[in-house]
Image (cartoon, grey):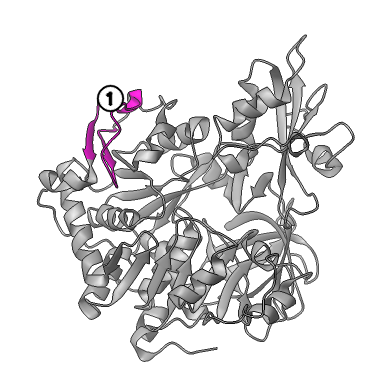
Amino acid sequence: MRVPGPRSADILEVMDGSWTLVDLVRRQARAHPERLAVEFEHGTSLTYREMDEESDRVAGALAGLGVIAGDRVLALVKNRVEFLTFMFATLKLGAIWVPINTELKGAFLQHQLRNSDPRLVVTEPGLVPAFSDVTALADAQLSGLVVVAGDPPGQLPPVFTRLTCVAASDLDGWGAAFDRLEPTPHDIAMICYTSGTTGPSKGVLMPQAHCYLFGVGLARRLALDVDDRYYVCMPLFHVNALLMQVIGTFISGAYCYIVERFSATTWLDDLRRTGATVTNGLGVIPEFIFRQPPTDHDADHQCRTIMAVPISDDWATAFRDRFGMDIVQGFGMTECNIPYYTHPDDPLIGGLAGRLQEEWFETAIVDPETDEPLPPGTVGELVVRPKLASCFMAGYFRMPDKTVEAWRNLWFHTGDACRFDDDGRMYFVDRMKDCIRRRGENISSYELEQVLNDHPSVAESAVVGIRVDGAGGEDEVKALVVPAAGVEVDWVALLDHCAARVPRFAVPRFFERIDEVPKTSTGKVQKQHFKAAGVTRDTWDRDSTGYVVPR
C-alpha cells in the first residue's frame, strides 16, 4: 500500500476549517492552477484554476437569479462538467446543492421536488420532459430554471411556464456581485436523497465536513497522490462517484476522467485509454465486468485498485488474478459516511467490510429489538455514531420523525444485518430494511406501490425484491397485485403504465395476482412471505414475452 506524500498529510488527518468543498477548490486552484483536475468523455475538461474561476462566474449568475444563502438548488443533470461548476457555485453562495437521480420522473420526482422546495432548478434539455407531470411546485418558492448544454425547449412543462428560464450559455447576462463566503465545516452543503423503504425517500442533510470526509477516507485508504488518475463510471448524483471518487481525487490534487454511464464492454478499453490507476465499481458493475469474455490482454492496464461492493466468493479471487488489480471493500451510507474499509492483509471474502476508521467513528452490533450489544459472531443490526462534529448527517430534511426514529439510544441505526469476527472485522450479512436494490440503484417499494395503485385495474399492491439466478447477487422487482373489483389485470398494460412513470431500473420484472395484502394489527404491510416465496408457478415474468423497457 502506498503512503500519501507530505503534500496531502496535513489534510488527510485533522479536521479544521479547510474541511469544506469551497475551501478545497480554492486551495487547489492556488496550489496547482494549471494541473488538469477533471475531464469528461464528451471532451470538456477543467484545470483546478478553471474550475474555481468558472464556478465563480456561475455563482454570480445564480446570485443574479435570486439565489441566496440557505436556498436549495436542485440539479437533474447527468455526468457533465456543468454538474461540478454549478455545484461549487451553489456552495460559494452558501446555498445547498440537491443532486437528483436523473432517471426520476412522475411521483418519484414530485416527492423530492416538494420536499426540497428549491429556489432554482438546473437541468438539461433531454431531461426537461421528466417534469411534465410534476405539479407540486405551483405555489412553492421556485423562481427559475437553468438549462445547461443548450437552449430550453420551446414547449416547457406547466410548472416552468411562470418562471425565469435561462440557458447556461446566457448566464453572463445575469451576472451579479456576490459575497465570497467562507462556509464552515458545520454548514449544510447538500441534500442527497436515499430511497424510501416503508415511506417516501428521505433527504439527508450533509454538512461540509461530512461531504469532505467521504473523500478523505477514500484518498487515505487508496493512498491517492498527485500522479493518480481516477476513472469514474458511476453517476455524480451518488455520493460514491461525487464525494468518494471526485472529491477524493481533488483532495489529493490528482485527475479524474468521468464517463456518462458504465459499460462492461468498454470499461477495460477506457482504463487503458485514460491511463487510470484507480476506479470504483458498485452493485453489479464488478460482476458484469468479470462476465465479459476473457482475453490475453485483461491485465494490460495501469489500474492497481478497484473499490468494489459487493463481491462474491464465486468470482472475486478470479477477478483479482485475471485483471491484476487489488479489490478494496467497505461499508457506508449517505447518512453515516464510510466507517469501514478492508485492509491489504484482510482476506478477499464476499461481505467483508473490513476494519473501522476508529479516529472518526464508533460502531456496535446490537439486538434490533432492544439495542443491547451482541457478542462477536452474532448477527444483529449495525449502529454507528461519529467522533467528530459534522462528519455525519445532520438529520433528514423536513422529516424530524424519521430523524428521531433513526437516532435511537444515541446511535444511528443502519437497518443492516451485520456481524463482527473475533479480530474486530465487520461483515455485512443482509439488509433489514424493506428496500430493493437493482442495477446499483435503491428502489423505494413505497413509491413504486403508489404508481401501481394509480392504475384503474389495481386495488392494492405490494412490491418486494427477490433473488433470481443471473441477477448478480442483487434484487429483481416483483409486484404483488390485488385487482380492482371485477377487473382482470393486463400485465403488459400495467408495465406500460409503470414504464411511463418510474425510472427504468424500477420497472417490475415479475407480477403476481393475490387476493389481499396481509397487514399487522397496526396496518403495517407484511411482505416477508412474498419475498421468501420468490418466483412461483403463478408469477408472470415480463422477460417471457420479450418486453423491453424503453430508455
Foreground pick, 52 / 179: 52
Q: Which residue is drawn at 54% across and 59% down?
A: 262
- At horizontal 23% and vertical 77% (from top left) the residue drawn is 34
In the picture of the structure, the residue carrying the numbered disc 1 is 161
Percent x, y of residue 545: 75, 34
Q: Which picture quadrant has residue 375?
A: bottom right
In this view, the residue in front, 304 or 120, is 304
Q: Quadrant of the N terminus?
A: bottom right
Residue closer to the observer: 438 or 114: 438
Which stretch did the figure color magenta? 142-166
Tell me where residue 51 appears, x and y as whole percent.
25, 65
Residue 220 belongs to the span the image colors magenta: no
The total number of labels drawn is 1
Asked whether 159 falls inside the magenta stretch, the response is yes
Q: What residue type is labelled 1?
A: Thr
At horizontal 18% and vertical 40% (from top left) the residue drawn is: 65
Residue found at the very far right of the displayed protein: 537
Rendered location of residue 499, percent (x, y): 59, 32
Left or right of 88: which side holds 527?
right
- Seen in the picture, residue 2 relative to 490 is either above or below; the reply is below
